[in-house]
Amino acid sequence: MASILIIGAGGVGRVVAHKCAQLPEVFSAITLASRTQGKCDVIAAEIMEKTGRSIDTASVDADSVPQLVALIRRVAPAMVINVALPYQDLTIMDACLATGVHYLDTANYEPLDEAKFEYSWQWAYRDRFRDAGLMALLGSGFDPGVTNVFCAHALKHHFDTIHTVDILDCNGGDHGYPFATNFNPEINIREVTANGRYWQDDQWVETKPMQLKRAFDFEAVGEKNMYLLYHEELESLAVHLPGLTRIRFWMTFGDAYLKHLEVFRNIGLDSIEPIDFQGHKIVPIQFLKALLPDPASLGPRTKGKTNIGCIVTGSKGGSAPFTRYIYNICDHEEAYRETFAQAVSYTTGVPAMIGAMMMLTGNWMRPGVWNMEQFDPDPFMAALNSHGLPWKDIAFQPLDDISPPA
């Protein structure tokens, strides 16, 4: 048993706290901290109602290493589960090093003033964590996270060489709003308005935002248009999968979502550059975030399912190439009944809990900084089935090649 500190009290933090509270044999004491302690107190009351467990709450500015260090020293956890903003990954990692505790997050670092996310900043911590005898597990959400583990599972149980991977993320949920994002609007809009990228033949190929699309029939959701984006797990999987020739990431968007996004872009509301407004500096995308529905409020009104998985083609023992499709279907309403959060938060929060459990139980414990696909997938895959995210692994057809127009 171990004490943990969860930093972040949005939708994902809510799920992580609920799921950890269900396992007192692993997580003996839980502290939930956020800039706004009142959000933590609401979640603590939910957990008391659901499980009868009491968790502690605290206020902390995750941009401040001294505040983080003081909180960690007071709580004395075995590890920190970081579900705050990606901008805060490095300050939380610094605080973990200063206090000698393990670290886990669900999304890689992104500078506040630049719409760019990559692992280089966090991979640069490898030696410091290893030398301190501490572990940092990066990207223990769904994508990244479970998708990485799905690839590791495919490599262990089906292939000795993986040729191509297509990661498909479909949210078939309906919340009834004309426009809302399922996680932090600022992060979401920065992500989907950036240029797309995919790895092919040992190099990155860049595309314009939403340039490549195709229809796909998702089980339990139906046919949806999905669009090629760049996503962070592509970077680590391109390094760690032997023989890989191509890896791509696809996400579904409805026409109404894309039309709103087009308008926001045309009038500059997606900009991260500060502007002068009535004597004040404001960042347009932060102003837009304030206008949009809080993602944490979507849970009680969202219906439908998500379907996220990996189509993996490879070979084994010199065989002809063949394809497996490994995926999970999650129901928004069932997720809300269990954790008071919709399925997008649930599919990220459950893997964060499982990753922490893998570390604390010793299944995955190795000093250094690691990505999910670098560990034995079997205990994690078993835990997905036991804790609300059952998966399927079926024979399938490879996704057709789609390339940018010449």
Image (cartoon, rainbow, N blue to C red):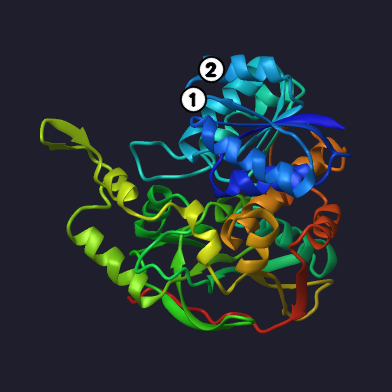
Point out the tag, 1 or 2, that comes first from the N-terminus.
1
Numbered label attached to residue 157? none
Residue appearing at x 62%, y 19% in the figure: 71
Q: Residues within 10 Å of mark 2 (few under 14, many from 20)?
A: some
Distance, label 1 to label 2, CA atoms, is: 6 Å
* For the residues bearing labels 1 and 2, Cβ distance under 8 angstroms: yes
Residue 221 in which image quadrant: bottom right
Element type at marker 1? loop
The C terminus - image quarter? bottom left
Above or below for 370 versus 179: above
Residue 40 horizontal/vertical position (percent) = 58, 36
Residue 156 in which image quadrant: bottom right
Residue 162 in which image quadrant: bottom right
Element type at marker 2? helix
* Furthest residue toward left: 278
Q: Is residue 28 visible to the viewer in this orientation of the structure? A: yes
Q: Is residue 164 visible to the viewer in this orientation of the structure? A: no
Read off the residue under disc 1. Answer: 61
Q: What amino acid is labelled 2 in the image?
A: Gln
Q: Residues within 10 Å of mark 1 (few under 14, many from 20)?
A: some
The N terminus - image quarter? top right
Q: What amino acid is labelled 1 in the image?
A: Asp
Residue 115 horizontal/vertical position (percent) = 36, 45
Please name whichever residue, 370 or 15, is drawn nearer the observer in this view of the structure. 15
Read off the residue under disc 2. Answer: 67
